[in-house]
Amino acid sequence: MYLTLFIVYFGWEKKGKTILIFEPDIEIVSENIQKELAILKKDTTFTHYFDTLGDYYALNNYQPIWMDVIFDSVFMAHLQIVSDSLVFDGFKREHYRLDTVLQMIKKTKTKPDKEINKTMACIDLYLSNALVTLWHDKVMGRTDPRIVLGGKYTLPFPNHPEFALLRVLDTQKGLDMLNAYKPQHRDYHKLRNLLIETFGKTEGSETMIDTIGIRKLKPGDTSIIVPMLAKRLVELGLAPDTFIYLYRDSLVYSRVLSDKITEIQKLSNLTDDGIIGKTTLKLLNASRNDKIDEIRANMERIRWFGIEPLKPYVSVNLPEFMLYMYYPDSVKSMPVCIGKGKERYYDQKTKKYKVSKSYLDKPLNHETPQVYSNIDFVILNPTWTVPSSIVGREMYNLIVKDPGYLNRNNFQVLKNKEVINPYSINWRKLSPGNIPYTIRQNSGDDNSLGKIKFTFKNPFDVYLHDTPLKGKFKLNNRAVSYGCVRVQAPIDLAGFVLQGNIKQTYDDVLIKMGLPPTDTARARRWREDSSSYKLVVKGTYPVRLENKMTVFFDYRTIVFDVFDKPRFVFDVYDKNILIVEAMDKP
Protein backbone atom coordinates (compact mmCIF):
# COMPACT_ATOMS: atom_id res chain seq x y z
CA MET A 1 0.00 0.00 0.00
CA TYR A 2 2.72 2.46 0.98
CA LEU A 3 4.70 1.59 -2.12
CA THR A 4 1.62 2.23 -4.26
CA LEU A 5 1.08 5.66 -2.70
CA PHE A 6 4.69 6.55 -3.33
CA ILE A 7 4.47 5.56 -6.97
CA VAL A 8 1.16 7.39 -7.59
CA TYR A 9 2.01 10.70 -6.02
CA PHE A 10 5.68 11.13 -6.66
CA GLY A 11 7.47 11.59 -9.97
CA TRP A 12 10.84 12.42 -11.38
CA GLU A 13 12.29 15.01 -13.75
CA LYS A 14 13.14 13.96 -17.30
CA LYS A 15 14.46 16.53 -19.77
CA GLY A 16 12.74 19.40 -18.00
CA LYS A 17 9.42 17.64 -17.52
CA THR A 18 8.02 15.97 -14.44
CA ILE A 19 7.00 12.43 -15.33
CA LEU A 20 4.34 10.96 -13.07
CA ILE A 21 4.53 7.19 -12.81
CA PHE A 22 0.76 6.97 -12.54
CA GLU A 23 -0.99 10.05 -13.85
CA PRO A 24 -4.37 11.10 -12.39
CA ASP A 25 -7.45 9.50 -13.92
CA ILE A 26 -8.60 11.91 -16.64
CA GLU A 27 -12.21 10.74 -16.47
CA ILE A 28 -12.36 11.40 -12.75
CA VAL A 29 -10.58 14.75 -13.22
CA SER A 30 -13.25 15.67 -15.81
CA GLU A 31 -16.02 14.73 -13.41
CA ASN A 32 -14.41 16.92 -10.77
CA ILE A 33 -14.11 19.82 -13.23
CA GLN A 34 -17.84 19.65 -13.87
CA LYS A 35 -18.63 19.54 -10.14
CA GLU A 36 -16.24 22.36 -9.25
CA LEU A 37 -17.57 24.57 -12.04
CA ALA A 38 -21.07 24.32 -10.62
CA ILE A 39 -19.73 25.65 -7.30
CA LEU A 40 -17.37 28.30 -8.68
CA LYS A 41 -20.02 29.85 -10.95
CA LYS A 42 -21.95 30.87 -7.83
CA ASP A 43 -18.97 32.51 -6.13
CA THR A 44 -19.59 36.27 -5.89
CA THR A 45 -16.55 37.14 -3.79
CA PHE A 46 -14.34 37.96 -6.77
CA THR A 47 -14.42 38.72 -10.50
CA HIS A 48 -14.28 35.57 -12.61
CA TYR A 49 -15.24 34.04 -15.94
CA PHE A 50 -16.43 30.64 -14.77
CA ASP A 51 -19.74 31.02 -16.62
CA THR A 52 -17.93 31.49 -19.93
CA LEU A 53 -15.40 28.80 -19.06
CA GLY A 54 -18.23 26.45 -18.16
CA ASP A 55 -19.54 26.61 -21.72
CA TYR A 56 -16.04 26.07 -23.10
CA TYR A 57 -15.33 23.06 -20.90
CA ALA A 58 -18.77 21.60 -21.65
CA LEU A 59 -18.05 21.70 -25.40
CA ASN A 60 -14.91 19.68 -24.68
CA ASN A 61 -16.58 17.17 -22.37
CA TYR A 62 -14.95 18.83 -19.35
CA GLN A 63 -11.54 17.56 -20.40
CA PRO A 64 -8.66 19.26 -18.56
CA ILE A 65 -6.75 21.83 -20.61
CA TRP A 66 -3.45 22.09 -18.79
CA MET A 67 -2.68 18.65 -17.40
CA ASP A 68 -0.18 17.85 -20.14
CA VAL A 69 1.85 21.03 -19.71
CA ILE A 70 1.84 22.09 -16.05
CA PHE A 71 4.74 19.75 -15.26
CA ASP A 72 6.80 21.03 -18.19
CA SER A 73 9.60 23.25 -16.85
CA VAL A 74 9.55 25.60 -19.86
CA PHE A 75 5.81 26.17 -19.55
CA MET A 76 6.12 26.73 -15.81
CA ALA A 77 8.95 29.22 -16.31
CA HIS A 78 6.74 31.20 -18.69
CA LEU A 79 3.83 31.01 -16.26
CA GLN A 80 6.06 32.35 -13.49
CA ILE A 81 7.07 35.28 -15.73
CA VAL A 82 3.41 36.09 -16.34
CA SER A 83 2.70 35.97 -12.61
CA ASP A 84 5.71 38.11 -11.70
CA SER A 85 5.25 40.76 -14.39
CA LEU A 86 1.53 41.50 -14.14
CA VAL A 87 2.21 44.09 -11.40
CA PHE A 88 4.15 46.15 -13.96
CA ASP A 89 0.91 46.61 -15.89
CA GLY A 90 -0.71 48.04 -12.79
CA PHE A 91 -2.49 44.88 -11.65
CA LYS A 92 -2.43 43.14 -8.28
CA ARG A 93 -1.28 39.54 -8.01
CA GLU A 94 -4.01 38.52 -5.56
CA HIS A 95 -6.73 39.28 -8.11
CA TYR A 96 -5.56 36.46 -10.40
CA ARG A 97 -4.52 33.87 -7.81
CA LEU A 98 -1.68 32.61 -9.95
CA ASP A 99 0.48 32.25 -6.85
CA THR A 100 -2.11 29.81 -5.48
CA VAL A 101 -2.05 27.84 -8.71
CA LEU A 102 1.75 27.69 -8.72
CA GLN A 103 1.79 26.49 -5.12
CA MET A 104 -0.79 23.80 -5.87
CA ILE A 105 1.26 22.56 -8.83
CA LYS A 106 4.42 22.53 -6.74
CA LYS A 107 2.65 20.61 -3.99
CA THR A 108 1.52 17.87 -6.36
CA LYS A 109 5.18 17.27 -7.24
CA THR A 110 6.43 16.91 -3.69
CA LYS A 111 3.66 15.62 -1.42
CA PRO A 112 1.16 12.79 -1.54
CA ASP A 113 -2.37 13.95 -2.29
CA LYS A 114 -5.30 11.67 -1.58
CA GLU A 115 -7.50 14.06 -3.61
CA ILE A 116 -5.20 14.21 -6.64
CA ASN A 117 -8.04 14.13 -9.18
CA LYS A 118 -9.90 16.97 -7.46
CA THR A 119 -6.66 18.92 -7.06
CA MET A 120 -5.88 18.59 -10.76
CA ALA A 121 -9.41 19.76 -11.59
CA CYS A 122 -9.02 22.83 -9.38
CA ILE A 123 -5.61 23.63 -10.84
CA ASP A 124 -7.08 23.47 -14.34
CA LEU A 125 -10.02 25.72 -13.54
CA TYR A 126 -8.09 28.26 -11.48
CA LEU A 127 -5.38 28.51 -14.12
CA SER A 128 -7.89 28.94 -16.94
CA ASN A 129 -9.76 31.63 -15.06
CA ALA A 130 -6.56 33.46 -14.07
CA LEU A 131 -5.28 33.61 -17.64
CA VAL A 132 -8.63 34.56 -19.17
CA THR A 133 -9.17 37.29 -16.58
CA LEU A 134 -5.67 38.70 -17.02
CA TRP A 135 -5.98 38.57 -20.81
CA HIS A 136 -9.25 40.53 -20.66
CA ASP A 137 -7.83 43.08 -18.22
CA LYS A 138 -4.65 43.69 -20.21
CA VAL A 139 -6.54 44.29 -23.45
CA MET A 140 -9.87 45.82 -22.39
CA GLY A 141 -9.12 47.17 -18.92
CA ARG A 142 -9.94 45.74 -15.52
CA THR A 143 -12.82 48.15 -14.97
CA ASP A 144 -15.69 49.72 -16.93
CA PRO A 145 -15.28 53.51 -17.20
CA ARG A 146 -19.01 54.04 -17.61
CA ILE A 147 -19.52 52.50 -14.17
CA VAL A 148 -16.44 54.05 -12.55
CA LEU A 149 -16.81 57.59 -13.89
CA GLY A 150 -20.50 57.74 -14.70
CA GLY A 151 -22.37 59.50 -17.47
CA LYS A 152 -19.76 62.19 -18.15
CA TYR A 153 -17.46 59.60 -19.71
CA THR A 154 -18.47 58.92 -23.33
CA LEU A 155 -15.19 58.03 -25.03
CA PRO A 156 -15.47 54.94 -27.25
CA PHE A 157 -13.79 51.69 -26.35
CA PRO A 158 -10.83 50.72 -28.56
CA ASN A 159 -11.69 48.33 -31.34
CA HIS A 160 -9.80 45.04 -30.98
CA PRO A 161 -11.02 42.90 -33.90
CA GLU A 162 -8.32 40.32 -33.16
CA PHE A 163 -9.34 39.96 -29.52
CA ALA A 164 -10.94 36.67 -28.49
CA LEU A 165 -11.27 36.03 -24.79
CA LEU A 166 -10.52 32.30 -24.91
CA ARG A 167 -7.51 32.48 -27.25
CA VAL A 168 -5.30 32.55 -24.19
CA LEU A 169 -6.31 28.94 -23.41
CA ASP A 170 -4.03 27.76 -26.21
CA THR A 171 -1.47 25.65 -24.34
CA GLN A 172 1.24 26.32 -26.95
CA LYS A 173 0.82 30.04 -27.67
CA GLY A 174 -1.40 31.45 -24.90
CA LEU A 175 1.26 32.41 -22.37
CA ASP A 176 3.56 33.99 -24.95
CA MET A 177 0.67 36.00 -26.37
CA LEU A 178 -0.38 37.14 -22.89
CA ASN A 179 3.12 38.11 -21.83
CA ALA A 180 3.89 39.95 -25.07
CA TYR A 181 0.72 42.05 -25.26
CA LYS A 182 1.02 45.78 -24.55
CA PRO A 183 -1.35 48.59 -25.62
CA GLN A 184 0.08 50.45 -28.62
CA HIS A 185 -0.50 53.94 -27.26
CA ARG A 186 2.72 55.98 -27.25
CA ASP A 187 2.53 56.67 -23.50
CA TYR A 188 1.80 53.16 -22.21
CA HIS A 189 5.39 51.92 -22.43
CA LYS A 190 6.57 55.13 -20.72
CA LEU A 191 4.08 54.66 -17.88
CA ARG A 192 5.09 51.02 -17.50
CA ASN A 193 8.77 51.97 -17.18
CA LEU A 194 7.84 54.71 -14.72
CA LEU A 195 5.91 52.16 -12.64
CA ILE A 196 8.87 49.78 -12.59
CA GLU A 197 11.14 52.65 -11.53
CA THR A 198 8.73 53.71 -8.78
CA PHE A 199 8.43 50.14 -7.48
CA GLY A 200 12.20 50.19 -7.10
CA LYS A 201 12.16 53.15 -4.73
CA THR A 202 12.33 52.48 -1.00
CA GLU A 203 8.92 52.33 0.62
CA GLY A 204 8.34 54.43 3.72
CA SER A 205 11.25 56.83 3.20
CA GLU A 206 8.99 59.86 2.77
CA THR A 207 8.43 62.53 5.37
CA MET A 208 4.71 63.00 5.94
CA ILE A 209 3.84 66.54 7.02
CA ASP A 210 1.45 66.72 9.96
CA THR A 211 -1.49 68.82 8.73
CA ILE A 212 -3.59 68.80 11.89
CA GLY A 213 -4.71 72.31 12.77
CA ILE A 214 -3.16 73.86 9.65
CA ARG A 215 -5.44 75.68 7.21
CA LYS A 216 -3.03 77.90 5.32
CA LEU A 217 0.63 78.77 5.62
CA LYS A 218 1.77 82.01 3.99
CA PRO A 219 5.34 83.27 3.50
CA GLY A 220 6.50 84.81 6.75
CA ASP A 221 4.16 82.71 8.92
CA THR A 222 5.54 80.51 11.67
CA SER A 223 4.73 76.83 12.07
CA ILE A 224 6.15 73.67 13.60
CA ILE A 225 5.92 71.97 10.17
CA VAL A 226 8.77 74.06 8.66
CA PRO A 227 11.55 71.49 9.43
CA MET A 228 9.38 68.70 8.00
CA LEU A 229 8.61 70.84 4.96
CA ALA A 230 12.32 71.45 4.29
CA LYS A 231 13.07 67.73 4.59
CA ARG A 232 10.19 66.85 2.25
CA LEU A 233 11.49 69.29 -0.38
CA VAL A 234 14.87 67.56 -0.23
CA GLU A 235 13.22 64.14 -0.64
CA LEU A 236 11.34 65.42 -3.69
CA GLY A 237 14.59 66.58 -5.25
CA LEU A 238 13.54 70.24 -5.19
CA ALA A 239 16.08 71.43 -2.62
CA PRO A 240 19.68 70.58 -1.70
CA ASP A 241 20.49 68.40 1.33
CA THR A 242 21.62 71.50 3.23
CA PHE A 243 17.97 72.52 3.64
CA ILE A 244 17.55 69.83 6.29
CA TYR A 245 20.21 71.43 8.48
CA LEU A 246 19.32 75.05 7.68
CA TYR A 247 15.71 74.60 8.75
CA ARG A 248 15.90 71.88 11.38
CA ASP A 249 15.34 74.41 14.20
CA SER A 250 13.41 77.02 12.20
CA LEU A 251 9.70 77.81 12.52
CA VAL A 252 9.59 80.55 9.85
CA TYR A 253 8.11 79.75 6.45
CA SER A 254 10.67 81.78 4.50
CA ARG A 255 10.52 83.20 1.00
CA VAL A 256 13.18 80.69 -0.07
CA LEU A 257 10.91 77.81 0.96
CA SER A 258 7.82 79.41 -0.59
CA ASP A 259 9.70 79.77 -3.91
CA LYS A 260 10.25 76.02 -3.88
CA ILE A 261 6.57 75.46 -3.15
CA THR A 262 5.71 77.76 -6.06
CA GLU A 263 7.77 75.50 -8.36
CA ILE A 264 5.71 72.48 -7.27
CA GLN A 265 2.47 74.38 -7.75
CA LYS A 266 3.46 75.46 -11.27
CA LEU A 267 4.44 71.93 -12.29
CA SER A 268 1.12 70.60 -11.02
CA ASN A 269 -1.03 73.36 -12.56
CA LEU A 270 -2.02 74.80 -9.20
CA THR A 271 -2.24 78.48 -8.28
CA ASP A 272 1.42 79.39 -7.86
CA ASP A 273 1.17 81.76 -4.90
CA GLY A 274 3.50 79.86 -2.55
CA ILE A 275 0.68 79.57 -0.01
CA ILE A 276 0.40 76.09 1.48
CA GLY A 277 -3.22 75.06 1.78
CA LYS A 278 -5.13 71.80 1.72
CA THR A 279 -4.39 71.02 -1.94
CA THR A 280 -0.68 71.82 -1.76
CA LEU A 281 -0.31 69.76 1.44
CA LYS A 282 -1.99 66.84 -0.30
CA LEU A 283 0.54 67.18 -3.11
CA LEU A 284 3.50 67.33 -0.73
CA ASN A 285 2.30 64.29 1.21
CA ALA A 286 1.86 62.13 -1.88
CA SER A 287 3.68 58.90 -0.99
CA ARG A 288 5.40 56.31 -3.14
CA ASN A 289 2.22 54.24 -3.06
CA ASP A 290 0.17 57.28 -4.07
CA LYS A 291 2.45 57.69 -7.10
CA ILE A 292 2.09 54.02 -7.94
CA ASP A 293 -1.69 54.32 -7.81
CA GLU A 294 -1.63 57.40 -10.02
CA ILE A 295 0.46 55.55 -12.61
CA ARG A 296 -1.90 52.57 -12.41
CA ALA A 297 -4.92 54.81 -12.98
CA ASN A 298 -3.33 56.38 -16.05
CA MET A 299 -2.43 52.97 -17.48
CA GLU A 300 -6.03 51.86 -17.01
CA ARG A 301 -7.22 54.95 -18.89
CA ILE A 302 -5.11 53.92 -21.89
CA ARG A 303 -6.61 50.43 -21.79
CA TRP A 304 -10.05 52.07 -21.87
CA PHE A 305 -9.17 54.51 -24.59
CA GLY A 306 -5.87 54.00 -26.36
CA ILE A 307 -7.09 55.26 -29.71
CA GLU A 308 -4.82 57.15 -32.07
CA PRO A 309 -7.24 58.71 -34.63
CA LEU A 310 -6.23 59.45 -38.17
CA LYS A 311 -4.34 62.73 -38.30
CA PRO A 312 -5.11 65.60 -38.31
CA TYR A 313 -7.16 65.69 -35.12
CA VAL A 314 -7.70 67.77 -31.98
CA SER A 315 -7.41 66.53 -28.41
CA VAL A 316 -7.77 68.27 -25.06
CA ASN A 317 -6.11 66.93 -21.92
CA LEU A 318 -8.43 68.29 -19.25
CA PRO A 319 -6.26 68.21 -16.09
CA GLU A 320 -3.30 69.60 -18.02
CA PHE A 321 -5.45 72.49 -19.36
CA MET A 322 -3.94 72.02 -22.82
CA LEU A 323 -5.27 71.52 -26.35
CA TYR A 324 -3.20 69.65 -28.93
CA MET A 325 -3.41 69.93 -32.71
CA TYR A 326 -1.96 66.81 -34.32
CA TYR A 327 -0.62 67.43 -37.81
CA PRO A 328 0.60 64.45 -39.88
CA ASP A 329 4.20 65.26 -38.95
CA SER A 330 4.07 67.54 -35.91
CA VAL A 331 2.08 68.70 -32.90
CA LYS A 332 1.13 72.18 -31.74
CA SER A 333 -0.54 73.10 -28.47
CA MET A 334 -2.30 75.93 -26.68
CA PRO A 335 -3.65 76.56 -23.17
CA VAL A 336 -7.35 76.10 -22.48
CA CYS A 337 -9.77 76.76 -19.65
CA ILE A 338 -12.10 73.94 -18.58
CA GLY A 339 -15.11 73.46 -16.30
CA LYS A 340 -14.87 74.42 -12.63
CA GLY A 341 -15.75 70.96 -11.42
CA LYS A 342 -18.10 69.94 -8.64
CA GLU A 343 -19.25 72.29 -5.95
CA ARG A 344 -17.52 71.85 -2.61
CA TYR A 345 -19.09 69.16 -0.40
CA TYR A 346 -20.95 67.94 -3.48
CA ASP A 347 -21.92 64.51 -2.11
CA GLN A 348 -23.28 65.90 1.17
CA LYS A 349 -25.26 68.59 -0.68
CA THR A 350 -26.63 65.98 -3.07
CA LYS A 351 -28.05 64.04 -0.13
CA LYS A 352 -29.66 67.21 1.21
CA TYR A 353 -31.13 68.01 -2.22
CA LYS A 354 -32.67 64.54 -2.52
CA VAL A 355 -34.56 65.24 0.69
CA SER A 356 -35.50 68.90 0.19
CA LYS A 357 -36.04 68.83 -3.60
CA SER A 358 -35.28 72.54 -3.49
CA TYR A 359 -33.72 73.97 -6.63
CA LEU A 360 -31.29 76.09 -4.65
CA ASP A 361 -30.11 73.03 -2.70
CA LYS A 362 -29.06 71.20 -5.88
CA PRO A 363 -25.23 71.24 -5.98
CA LEU A 364 -23.53 72.34 -9.17
CA ASN A 365 -21.29 70.12 -11.27
CA HIS A 366 -19.47 72.02 -14.00
CA GLU A 367 -16.96 69.26 -14.81
CA THR A 368 -16.10 69.19 -18.50
CA PRO A 369 -17.15 65.75 -19.78
CA GLN A 370 -14.96 63.35 -21.71
CA VAL A 371 -16.36 63.31 -25.23
CA TYR A 372 -15.36 62.00 -28.65
CA SER A 373 -16.85 63.61 -31.74
CA ASN A 374 -16.16 65.45 -34.99
CA ILE A 375 -15.92 69.21 -35.37
CA ASP A 376 -18.50 70.14 -38.02
CA PHE A 377 -18.78 73.95 -37.90
CA VAL A 378 -16.69 77.01 -37.15
CA ILE A 379 -19.17 79.72 -36.16
CA LEU A 380 -18.10 83.35 -36.43
CA ASN A 381 -19.68 85.89 -34.09
CA PRO A 382 -21.69 83.30 -32.15
CA THR A 383 -24.59 84.01 -29.84
CA TRP A 384 -24.72 82.42 -26.39
CA THR A 385 -27.82 80.72 -25.05
CA VAL A 386 -27.38 80.94 -21.29
CA PRO A 387 -27.86 77.60 -19.46
CA SER A 388 -30.87 77.57 -17.14
CA SER A 389 -28.62 76.84 -14.13
CA ILE A 390 -26.70 80.09 -14.71
CA VAL A 391 -29.91 82.04 -15.27
CA GLY A 392 -31.47 80.75 -12.06
CA ARG A 393 -28.45 80.99 -9.79
CA GLU A 394 -26.41 83.91 -11.09
CA MET A 395 -28.70 86.14 -13.15
CA TYR A 396 -32.14 85.84 -11.57
CA ASN A 397 -31.57 88.19 -8.62
CA LEU A 398 -29.89 90.75 -10.86
CA ILE A 399 -32.81 90.65 -13.29
CA VAL A 400 -35.41 90.95 -10.51
CA LYS A 401 -33.59 93.97 -9.13
CA ASP A 402 -33.17 95.62 -12.55
CA PRO A 403 -34.42 94.07 -15.84
CA GLY A 404 -32.26 96.65 -17.62
CA TYR A 405 -29.28 94.49 -16.66
CA LEU A 406 -30.17 92.30 -19.65
CA ASN A 407 -30.09 95.08 -22.25
CA ARG A 408 -26.90 96.58 -20.86
CA ASN A 409 -25.11 93.24 -21.20
CA ASN A 410 -26.44 92.48 -24.70
CA PHE A 411 -28.93 89.80 -23.61
CA GLN A 412 -32.31 89.11 -25.18
CA VAL A 413 -35.31 87.30 -23.70
CA LEU A 414 -37.10 84.86 -25.99
CA LYS A 415 -40.35 82.95 -25.78
CA ASN A 416 -41.06 80.45 -28.57
CA LYS A 417 -38.19 82.05 -30.49
CA GLU A 418 -39.85 85.48 -30.28
CA VAL A 419 -38.00 88.36 -28.58
CA ILE A 420 -39.79 89.61 -25.43
CA ASN A 421 -39.34 92.95 -23.69
CA PRO A 422 -37.75 92.06 -20.30
CA TYR A 423 -39.74 94.89 -18.64
CA SER A 424 -43.01 93.21 -19.68
CA ILE A 425 -42.28 90.22 -17.43
CA ASN A 426 -43.07 90.08 -13.71
CA TRP A 427 -39.81 88.39 -12.75
CA ARG A 428 -40.66 88.33 -9.04
CA LYS A 429 -43.45 85.83 -9.70
CA LEU A 430 -41.07 83.39 -11.36
CA SER A 431 -39.12 80.70 -9.58
CA PRO A 432 -35.35 80.75 -10.24
CA GLY A 433 -35.57 77.03 -10.91
CA ASN A 434 -38.35 77.31 -13.47
CA ILE A 435 -37.95 80.34 -15.72
CA PRO A 436 -40.06 79.74 -18.90
CA TYR A 437 -37.90 81.97 -21.09
CA THR A 438 -34.69 81.57 -23.05
CA ILE A 439 -32.01 84.16 -22.39
CA ARG A 440 -29.56 84.67 -25.22
CA GLN A 441 -26.54 86.93 -25.45
CA ASN A 442 -26.13 88.51 -28.87
CA SER A 443 -22.85 88.38 -30.74
CA GLY A 444 -20.38 91.15 -30.06
CA ASP A 445 -17.13 92.04 -28.35
CA ASP A 446 -18.54 91.24 -24.91
CA ASN A 447 -20.13 87.93 -25.87
CA SER A 448 -19.05 85.17 -23.47
CA LEU A 449 -18.10 82.91 -26.39
CA GLY A 450 -15.87 85.55 -27.97
CA LYS A 451 -15.58 85.73 -31.76
CA ILE A 452 -15.43 82.04 -32.70
CA LYS A 453 -17.17 78.85 -31.62
CA PHE A 454 -16.31 75.29 -32.71
CA THR A 455 -19.26 72.89 -32.62
CA PHE A 456 -19.45 69.10 -32.56
CA LYS A 457 -22.27 66.75 -31.66
CA ASN A 458 -22.28 65.48 -28.09
CA PRO A 459 -24.91 64.77 -25.40
CA PHE A 460 -23.74 67.64 -23.16
CA ASP A 461 -23.89 70.53 -25.64
CA VAL A 462 -20.28 71.47 -24.86
CA TYR A 463 -18.01 73.08 -27.42
CA LEU A 464 -14.70 74.86 -27.92
CA HIS A 465 -14.85 78.63 -28.03
CA ASP A 466 -13.06 81.96 -27.83
CA THR A 467 -13.47 84.17 -24.73
CA PRO A 468 -13.18 87.88 -23.93
CA LEU A 469 -11.62 86.92 -20.57
CA LYS A 470 -8.07 86.49 -21.86
CA GLY A 471 -6.55 87.00 -18.41
CA LYS A 472 -7.75 83.57 -17.29
CA PHE A 473 -5.08 81.93 -19.46
CA LYS A 474 -2.40 83.36 -17.19
CA LEU A 475 -3.65 81.15 -14.36
CA ASN A 476 -2.05 77.77 -13.64
CA ASN A 477 -5.32 76.30 -12.44
CA ARG A 478 -7.65 77.06 -15.34
CA ALA A 479 -10.73 75.16 -14.18
CA VAL A 480 -12.87 78.30 -14.40
CA SER A 481 -15.62 77.74 -17.01
CA TYR A 482 -19.15 76.38 -16.82
CA GLY A 483 -18.19 73.19 -18.65
CA CYS A 484 -17.21 74.23 -22.17
CA VAL A 485 -13.57 74.60 -23.19
CA ARG A 486 -12.17 78.07 -23.81
CA VAL A 487 -9.19 78.21 -26.19
CA GLN A 488 -6.43 80.79 -26.01
CA ALA A 489 -5.76 81.05 -29.76
CA PRO A 490 -9.07 80.46 -31.60
CA ILE A 491 -7.75 81.91 -34.88
CA ASP A 492 -4.94 79.33 -34.93
CA LEU A 493 -7.39 76.55 -34.14
CA ALA A 494 -9.68 77.73 -36.95
CA GLY A 495 -6.74 77.53 -39.37
CA PHE A 496 -6.02 73.99 -38.23
CA VAL A 497 -9.57 72.62 -38.51
CA LEU A 498 -10.28 74.40 -41.82
CA GLN A 499 -7.11 73.17 -43.55
CA GLY A 500 -9.14 70.75 -45.68
CA ASN A 501 -11.72 73.31 -46.85
CA ILE A 502 -11.74 74.26 -50.54
CA LYS A 503 -15.05 76.13 -51.02
CA GLN A 504 -14.64 78.32 -47.94
CA THR A 505 -11.00 78.41 -47.00
CA TYR A 506 -9.26 79.61 -43.89
CA ASP A 507 -8.22 82.77 -45.78
CA ASP A 508 -11.88 83.42 -46.64
CA VAL A 509 -12.71 83.20 -42.95
CA LEU A 510 -9.88 85.56 -41.99
CA ILE A 511 -11.16 88.17 -44.45
CA LYS A 512 -14.71 87.83 -43.07
CA MET A 513 -13.23 88.54 -39.63
CA GLY A 514 -11.38 91.62 -40.89
CA LEU A 515 -7.97 89.94 -40.71
CA PRO A 516 -5.33 89.61 -43.44
CA PRO A 517 -5.24 86.27 -45.28
CA THR A 518 -2.20 84.01 -45.03
CA ASP A 519 -1.60 83.98 -48.80
CA THR A 520 0.93 86.74 -49.50
CA ALA A 521 -0.49 87.90 -52.84
CA ARG A 522 -4.04 87.84 -51.59
CA ALA A 523 -3.02 89.71 -48.43
CA ARG A 524 -1.44 92.47 -50.55
CA ARG A 525 -4.62 92.87 -52.59
CA TRP A 526 -6.65 92.85 -49.40
CA ARG A 527 -4.60 95.69 -47.93
CA GLU A 528 -4.74 97.72 -51.14
CA ASP A 529 -8.51 97.33 -51.57
CA SER A 530 -10.24 100.11 -49.66
CA SER A 531 -13.52 98.19 -49.78
CA SER A 532 -12.16 95.11 -47.98
CA TYR A 533 -13.98 96.15 -44.82
CA LYS A 534 -17.28 95.48 -46.60
CA LEU A 535 -16.46 91.76 -46.61
CA VAL A 536 -16.41 91.62 -42.81
CA VAL A 537 -19.43 89.76 -41.39
CA LYS A 538 -21.07 91.33 -38.35
CA GLY A 539 -23.76 88.78 -37.59
CA THR A 540 -23.48 85.09 -36.75
CA TYR A 541 -21.89 83.26 -39.67
CA PRO A 542 -21.43 79.45 -39.76
CA VAL A 543 -18.62 77.88 -41.77
CA ARG A 544 -19.07 74.18 -42.46
CA LEU A 545 -16.05 71.89 -42.35
CA GLU A 546 -15.92 70.09 -45.69
CA ASN A 547 -13.94 67.36 -43.92
CA LYS A 548 -15.05 66.95 -40.33
CA MET A 549 -12.20 66.71 -37.85
CA THR A 550 -11.96 64.34 -34.89
CA VAL A 551 -11.93 65.94 -31.47
CA PHE A 552 -11.85 64.33 -28.04
CA PHE A 553 -11.42 65.38 -24.43
CA ASP A 554 -9.02 63.12 -22.60
CA TYR A 555 -7.97 62.97 -18.94
CA ARG A 556 -4.34 62.13 -18.17
CA THR A 557 -2.66 63.27 -14.97
CA ILE A 558 0.81 62.12 -16.07
CA VAL A 559 2.24 63.73 -19.18
CA PHE A 560 5.65 63.35 -20.83
CA ASP A 561 7.81 66.03 -22.41
CA VAL A 562 9.85 65.64 -25.60
CA PHE A 563 12.60 63.97 -23.56
CA ASP A 564 10.09 61.50 -22.04
CA LYS A 565 10.40 63.11 -18.62
CA PRO A 566 7.15 62.61 -16.68
CA ARG A 567 5.18 65.42 -15.10
CA PHE A 568 2.42 64.75 -12.60
CA VAL A 569 -0.38 67.31 -12.95
CA PHE A 570 -3.02 67.86 -10.31
CA ASP A 571 -6.04 65.58 -10.55
CA VAL A 572 -8.43 68.51 -10.82
CA TYR A 573 -11.64 66.42 -10.75
CA ASP A 574 -10.37 63.73 -8.32
CA LYS A 575 -10.84 60.89 -10.81
CA ASN A 576 -7.75 58.79 -10.03
CA ILE A 577 -9.06 57.59 -6.68
CA LEU A 578 -12.27 56.34 -8.32
CA ILE A 579 -10.29 54.28 -10.84
CA VAL A 580 -7.90 52.84 -8.25
CA GLU A 581 -10.73 51.87 -5.90
CA ALA A 582 -12.52 50.09 -8.75
CA MET A 583 -9.32 48.32 -9.85
CA ASP A 584 -8.63 47.12 -6.32
CA LYS A 585 -11.97 45.39 -5.88
CA PRO A 586 -11.56 41.56 -5.84
Image (cartoon, rainbow, N blue to C red):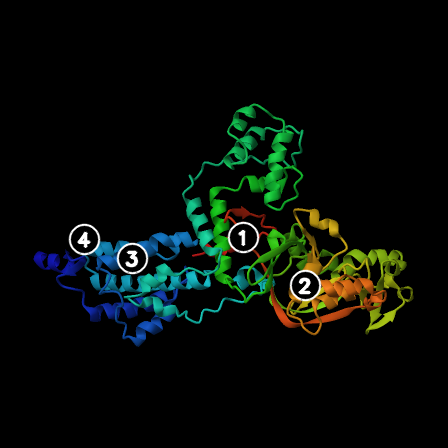
Depth-wise, is mark 3 or mark 2 nearer the camera? 2
- CA–CA distance between discs 4 and 2? 72 Å
Along the polypeptide, which appears first: circle 4 or circle 1?
4
Q: Nearer the viewer, residue 126 or 305?
A: 305
Residue type at numbered disc 2: Gly
Pointers 4 and 2 in contact (C-beta within 8 Å): no
| Residue at screen point 35% across, 74% down | 55
Which dot, 1 or 3, sits closer to the camera? 3
Quick check: can you spot residue 450? yes
Residue 389 or residue 293, whichever sits in front: 293
Displayed quadrant of residue 586: bottom left
Ranked by sequence position, the earlier of labels 1 and 2 is 2
Mark 4 or mark 2, earlier in chain: 4
Q: Is residue 452 left or right of residue 582?
A: right
Left or right for 434, reference 288: right
Instruction: Determine contact: label 4, label 3, CB under 8 Å.
Output: no
Which of disc 3 and disc 1 is earlier in sequence? 3
Q: Read off the residue under disc 2.
A: 495
Q: What residue is shown with label 3? A: 78
Circle 4 residue: 110
Q: In whole angstroms, how far apart are the C-alphas of marks 1 and 3?
A: 32 Å
Gap between marks 3 and 2, in whole Å? 52 Å
Q: Please tell me how crowded label 3 is: few (under 14), some (14-19), or many (20+) other residues with Cα within 10 Å.
A: some
Q: Amino acid at mark 3?
A: His
